[in-house]
Image (cartoon, rainbow, N blue to C red):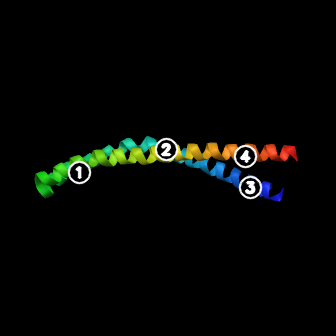
Amino acid sequence: MAYGSERRKLIEKRIAFLLEEEVGLKRSYQRLPYLWGSAVFIVPAFFLWGIVGAVSAVVCVPGLVATGYYIVRIRRQENFGDLNDLERQLAFLKSQDEEE
């Protein structure tokens, strides 16, 4: 019985953490379009390193933006899956407590 109550507290703490993290990830997702601003480095790259530097910057900027979207999206999916698992575990613990 003590194990169940400790486990429940840990699960509830983790759920609260995941919900807070989701707020931060939503904020990060909304800020990702600002990464396109790094395209301003294309012109200085051209003057410093020539066409090779400019082409490298042109290739890297979309890669940077795409990577940002990918990382945030995957993390949100992981959090969603973890949250569902924890809610199932919490429901199971509550049903076990009701049976006792």
Task: Give residue 94's position: percent from left, percent from top.
Answer: 79, 45
Pick the residue in front: 84 or 67: 84
Q: Residue furthest left?
A: 50
Q: Which residue is mark 3?
A: 7
Amino acid marked by disc 2: Arg
Who is closer to the viewer here, 62 or 92? 92
Cα distance between the residues tagged 1 and 4: 50 Å
Circle 4 or circle 2, nearest the eye: 4
Q: Nearer the viewer, residue 74 or 26?
A: 74
Residue drawn at the location 17% of the way across and 49% of the way down: 55
Q: Disc count in the image?
A: 4
- Residue 90: which disc? 4
In the rendered structure, the answer to whether residue 40 lies left or right of residue 72 reads left
Name the residue carrying label 1: 41
- The residue nearer to you, when weighing 46 against 59, is 59
Residue 41's spot in the image, x, y percent? 23, 51
Q: Give the distance between the C-alpha atoms of the residues marked 1 and 2, in whole angstroms.
A: 25 Å
On the rendered structure, is 25 left or right of 19?
left
Report the quarter where the N terminus lies. bottom right
Residue that numbered label 2 is attached to: 27
Q: Amino acid at mark 3?
A: Arg
Give the CA distance from mark 4 to mark 3: 9 Å
Q: State which mark lies toward you, 2 or 3.
A: 3
